[in-house]
Amino acid sequence: MTGDLELATAFRDGDERAFAALFERFRRPLYVFALRMLGDADAARDLVQDVFVRVWERRAQLDRPESFRSWLFAVARNRCLSQLRRDRGQVALDDAPDEALAVAAAVDGPERDQDLALLRRALAGLKVEYREVLVLREYQELSYAEIADITESTESAVKSRLFKARRALHGTLDAASNRGR
């Protein structure tokens, strides 16, 4: 069993090996998603564990095994949003590891650290609905259709939010860059 569809079907039917294979396959992408949404490595690790427990408990509800990835990210998204509501939307991206931001900096040292800090603040400043589509599209490389499925919206709404997210992020980064001159 190597394909997502085959694994998801076996998982839905209670196959623990398929569940373990899916866990190994999606653990890291879910962690990165949760880390970018929450900005806290420990909370992201806990959330991934919680998501997989919930998914196991609700495996019989997986009506469309071909949409397993979307279903999994939808569960993770809902858990992230619940966590953010509990924390009143405060995201401590200043504490997030550099790999969470996946910035390919051309320089090392203090300038790179300043760029990462600026990006952390800019991401933290985005509305949650903008941050989630940006993370799902740019970092998880999900399609517009998958993101629409996860966020329970339309593809056009996803494209609109993504446009606004990119514009807001660019505006924040541009303004900060102009202040630094």
Image (cartoon, rainbow, N blue to C red):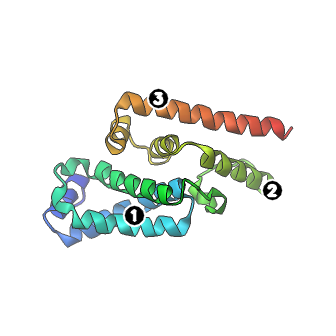
Give the side of residue 123 with respect to residue 25, left or right. right
Residue at image position (55%, 53%) is 89
Please state the horizontal and vertical placement of residue 11, each as a whole percent of the image.
19, 63
Q: How far is disc 3 from disc 2 in space, using C-alphas?
A: 35 Å
Name the N-terminal-most of marks 1 and 2: 1
* 135 relative to 164, above or below: below
Is residue 128 visible in this depiction of the protein?
yes
On residue 27, the disc is 1
Please state the horizontal and vertical placement of residue 75, each as a whole percent of the image.
34, 55
Residue at image position (52%, 70%) is 42
On residue 160, the disc is 3
The quadrant in which residue 100 appears is bottom right
Name the N-terminal-most of marks 3 and 1: 1
Q: Which residue is mark 2?
A: 110
Quarter of the picture holding the N terminus: bottom left
Q: Secondary structure at mark 2?
A: helix
Name the N-terminal-most of marks 3 and 2: 2
Please state the horizontal and vertical placement of residue 63, each as a whole percent of the image.
16, 51
* 171 relative to 80, above or below: above
* 132 relative to 22, above or below: above
Give the side of residue 86 with respect to residue 63, left or right. right
Q: Given contact means CB atoms under 8 Å apart, are the residues at marks 1 and 2 in contact? A: no
Q: Secondary structure at mark 1?
A: helix
Residue at image position (30%, 69%) is 53
Please state the horizontal and vertical placement of residue 76, each as a whole percent of the image.
38, 56
Give the side of residue 34 with respect to residue 40, left or right. left
